[in-house]
Structure formats: structure tokens, C-alpha cells
Amino acid sequence: MMNVLELLKKDPNLFIVENDNQSLKEVSVYQKNYDKDNVYFDMSIRCKTDIVNKKMRLYEVQRNKEFLIGQYADSEFGQLAFYIVVYSYFNQDKPSNSVRKMLRNIGEDVNKANKILEDHIGKNYFSLYRKEIGKINIDKINDDRCDVFYLSLENNIIPIVRNKRLTSAFVIIYNYGFYLKQFDSLIKKIISHYNLKLKKEETEELKRLYLKK
């Protein structure tokens, strides 16, 4: 039986608070500071589960103010969403500032950008000027402006930014390509752990939660 809370509890970077009553189970996940001795209480991801109908609601909580992320009638998929959202906000591994600097320093050289991106995130996660599903794409507007978007496995365009200068777009592609690769690693891990089978549309919904798009 799936219980992602048990997996989250094993992560030393997270701090978890549980509150239960007769009708509602509430779990709040916080991130520990880098020294692991303190907890950042200003922000959390909160999951509320109705004990009777099992309906789940996920919130981003900023200074005790709740912002709804999603609600799920399927408790198994809701747990997956909870796990993915927690690591979307609290993953310790971040894009490299040195790679970002490299991309900013090459101007509008597409060939150099392509090489840097391929070296640091891999060609499976981005495409420059050629639309490819499952990747972060760039669409040229004019000589120095472009849109950046994710093209889903269902061939839907998910906008990331519009009308950006090419030098900024390279950095944005790196950031989102990094997170796309990170999502693949995360979802493969939990699918393997619970021996799950996800539909394409379910995977894409979880992916968009991770990308916050």
C-alpha cells in the first residue's frame, strides 16, 4: 500500500508535522536549514485528507496563508502529487550558478549554447528552434527575442516565458531542463519503489506540478 509520508519522513532535510482529528488528517512539510538544526517555518507544503471520502487537497503555505495547489479524489494519485510537490519546492539540488554564468557570457551564440546545455542537462531535455515533445523548447520571434515553452508528450504547448532576449532564454532553458531531468529521476524512483504504472496524462500532470507550470 502506498504511503509516501513514510518516504518523506526518511529525508533528513525535511521536518514534518501531523495533525489528526475525527474528520481530517493534516500533514505539513517544512524544509530544514542547511545546518539541519533549524527549520524554516515561514513556508510549507500542506496536505489535507478527508478521512471519510479520502479526498486530498494540497496547499502552498506562506506565513500561515494557504494557497491551493490542487485537489484529488484519487488518494493514490494525490499521494504522488504530494510527494512531487514537496520536492518541487524543497529539493536540495539546484541549477548551477557557474553554468548560468557560462550561458550569459556567450551572447547569442546558439552553437555554444547547444554544447553547454547538452553537456550539463543532456539533449533529451531541450531543443533549440526545433519543436520536440517532452522537452524545453525555444521559438524565435525575431533576431534577438524568443519564447520558451515545454512541449508535453501530448503535444500541448506549456508557456514558460514569452518575448525574452536570447541570452536570458538560454539560462531559462537550462533551469527548466535541469528541473525536467530532476523530475524524471524522482518519478522513476517512486514508480520503482511502489511498482506503479502511470498513464501518460498522469505523468504529464505530475510533471507540470514539479515545473510549477
Image (cartoon, rainbow, N blue to C red):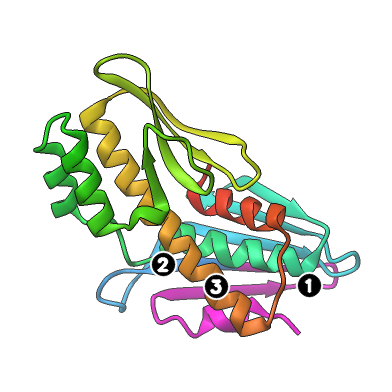
Q: Secondary structure beneath disc 3?
A: helix
Write the residue at 61% across / 56% down: 206
Please tell me whether residue 17 belongs to the stretch shown in magenta.
Answer: yes
| Rendered position, 18 above or below 201 | below
| Rendered position, 182 above or below 32 | above
Can you name the residue that lies furthest to the top here? 142
Label 3: how many Cα within 10 Å (few below 14, some 14–19, many 20+): few
Out of 20 and 8, give the one closest to the viewer: 8
User: Where is residue 79, by image quadrant?
Assistant: bottom right
The answer to whether the residues at label 2 and label 1 have Cβ atoms under 8 Å apart is no
The answer to whether the residues at label 3 and label 2 have Cβ atoms under 8 Å apart is no
Position in image of residue 86 (x %, y %): 52, 63
Q: Which mark is residue 188?
A: 3
Q: Which mark is residue 21?
A: 1
Q: Could you tell which of marks 2 and 1 lies nearer the N-terminus?
A: 1
Write the residue at 25% across / 58% down: 120
Q: Secondary structure beneath disc 2?
A: strand
Numbered disc in front, either 3 or 2: 3
- The residue segment tinted magenta is 1-27
Write the residue at 13% across / 45% down: 101
The amino acid pointed to by label 3 is: Lys
